[in-house]
Image (cartoon, grey):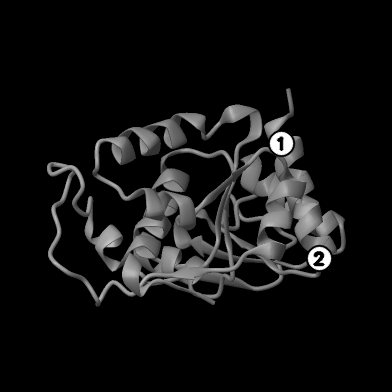
Amino acid sequence: AASYNAAAKELGALIAQEGWVQINGGGHVGLMGALTEGGIGAGGTVDAVILDMFVNTNMHPGLRNVEVKDNLASRKEGLFAPADAIIAIPGGLGTLEELLEAMSWHQLGLHHKPIVLLNTNGFWTGLTDWLTQITDKGFVSKNMVDTAFFVVDTPAEAIAVLKTYKPVIVDKTQLHKGQMNGDSPGQAISDWDAAQRHTAEL
């Protein structure tokens, strides 16, 4: 089985080799630290947005630009706004929260950035199984699941997805009234489905 640490470090290196800037939460330890180490070790640039409570205890010393925030909301916005893409490596509750928020914003049409789950050792399989379950029950549209994120097993596959990504835009302002939660077979499962007639690929 692949090492979580090794996969994170490899991803950081591959991002650097593409000439892309990595931006993360600035942590020195754990997989975030490994991601940063991989990037810097490959000659890349790593920026960060970090909570003030971690500046003196867990901030990687090799970061280029560091923004310090005093609350989680502004920290998350600071990470999200400049990003061209989102890659979720294995992590805990904070990672899951940020990932689901990015998916939710994508569903609402608030952004069209690619979201990639690096499924090292099947880490995200439980989440993708749950998404399949709630999709089957009609709480989430299959169209959202199919267009909002990608699941890959290796860092190289993550990079390949980003290099070939073409966003699918759904105009959620152009909705017609449809049934929600799959209660009426044959009708629109969600407003996402209802908006599909206005979908355009860039």
Is 144 left or right of 61, judged from the image as shown? Answer: left
Disc 1: CA contacts within 10 A as few (<14), some (14-19) or many (>=20): some
Q: Earlier in the sequence, mark 1 or mark 2?
A: 1
Of all residues, the one furthest to the top in this rendering is: 1
Q: Position of residue 22 (x, y in %)?
A: 68, 64
Residue mark closest to the camera, 1 vs 2: 2
Question: Disc 2 marks which amino acid?
Answer: Glu
Q: Secondary structure at mark 1?
A: helix
Above or below 181: residue 148: below
Q: Which residue occupies 32% across, 41% down?
A: 135
* Neighbourhood count class around disc 2 (C-alpha, 10 Å): few under 14, some 14–19, many 20 upward: few
The kind of residue tagged 1 is Asn
Which mark, residue 18?
2
Say the numbered circle drawn on residue 5. 1
From the viewer's perspective, tell me whether residue 73 is left or right of residue 95. left
102 left or right of 55 in image: left
Circle on res. 172: none
The picture places residue 73, in percent across and down from the top left corner, at 35, 64
For residue 67, above or below residue 30: below
**Horizontal side of residue 49 vs 3, given as left or right:** left
